Amino acid sequence: MSSPQKRVLCLHGYSQNANMFSKKLAAVRQQLPEVEFVFIEAPHVLQPVDLPAPSQMGYFAGFDSEPSPKEPQRGWWKTQNVQSIAAGLEVTLTLLKDVLKDQGVFNGVLGFSQGAVLAALLSGLLEKPEMYPTYLEDGKAVHPPFEFCISVAGYKPLDPLGAKLLTPNFKTPILHVIGHNDIIVTPERAQSLIDASLNGRVEFHDGGHFVPTKSAWRKFLAEYIRDPTGDVPGPNGKLPATNGSAPVSEPVTPILE
């Protein structure tokens, strides 16, 4: 088997795990046989007390509405009801430092919800590792900046460390994928991360809190990963119009499959 042309680090959402996220991206991965997708397991195993009640779901980043009782549900950090503190984030950053240092170079990173927040944090951190010196060894970053970041239902965190890594902004090319009907990470909440992106692109879908994988979307995501800085038509087949720092496309008309 030939070596992959690209490698993508994949970060699941809150209450998911690596295996669940791999299954959710199966249709996208099938479009990209030349790309290696590496799914990392979050370090924190969630207990029932860590999982939101239905009335609280809007306050939690990345809650998966279809958890499997046979697999541990995990998180990159725990927020409980204190949104300004990401408890366990430093443990996660240490884990990912080891992944980036020991598992070779990744061209890009793809995250969903809480994993999308983390993907953006990593992108900002690798641009300016001096802001988090544990990512420096002998004065050099443990990994080069990513060529691209894909944030599905991401937002800028309120946690002081997380916010610092994205303040005032970051320049890694980033694709923001936002659901018009997402009630967990609403378009308004996602705007906070868009505003921090100097080199962003925004694509909307008409669904809720999930990674869109219908035919038009998986083809678009595949082409974006192949050429993240190119003029790749959106899932609606149109090139995005420029809107400030982030080009924006209209949502694709749903296709029943």
Image (cartoon, rainbow, N blue to C red):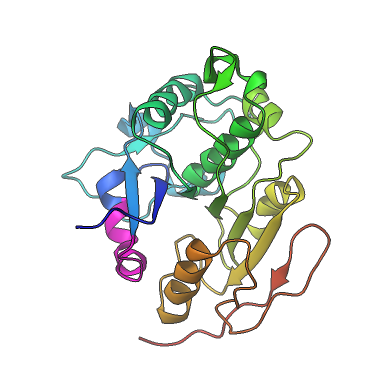
Instruction: Work out whether 128 lies above or below 250.
Output: above
Q: Residue furthest left?
A: 70
Residue 25 lies within the magenta run? yes
User: What residue do we see at 19% from left, 45% from top?
Assistant: 69
Q: Residue furthest front?
A: 2
User: What residue do we see at 71% from left, 41% from top?
Assistant: 170
Instruction: Work out whether 214 lies above or below 112.
Output: below
Res 49 quadrant in image:
top left
Give x and y (percent) for residue 36.
33, 53
Residue 157 lies within the magenta run? no
- Can residue 67 be seen here? The reply is no
Quarter in which the N terminus is drawn: bottom left
Give x and y (percent) for residue 158.
67, 32
Drawn side of residue 219 relative to residue 139, left or right = left
Looking at the magenta stretch, what is its main secondary structure?
helix
Say which of 145 and 119 sits in front: 145
Quarter in which the C terminus is drawn: bottom left
Residue range highlighted in magenta: 21-34
Say which of 14 and 237 sits in front: 237
User: What residue do we see at 37% from left, 36% from top?
Assistant: 104
Drawn side of residue 80 relative to residue 74, left or right = right
Res 81 quadrant in image:
top right
Say which of 203 and 210 sits in front: 203
- Can residue 245 be seen here? The reply is yes
Give x and y (percent) for residue 164.
70, 27
Q: Residue furthest right?
A: 244
Give x and y (percent) for residue 108.
49, 48
Drawn side of residue 179 relative to residue 111, left or right = right
Instruction: Work out whether 53 lies above or below 78.
Output: below
Instruction: Work out whether 127 lies above or below 16.
Output: above
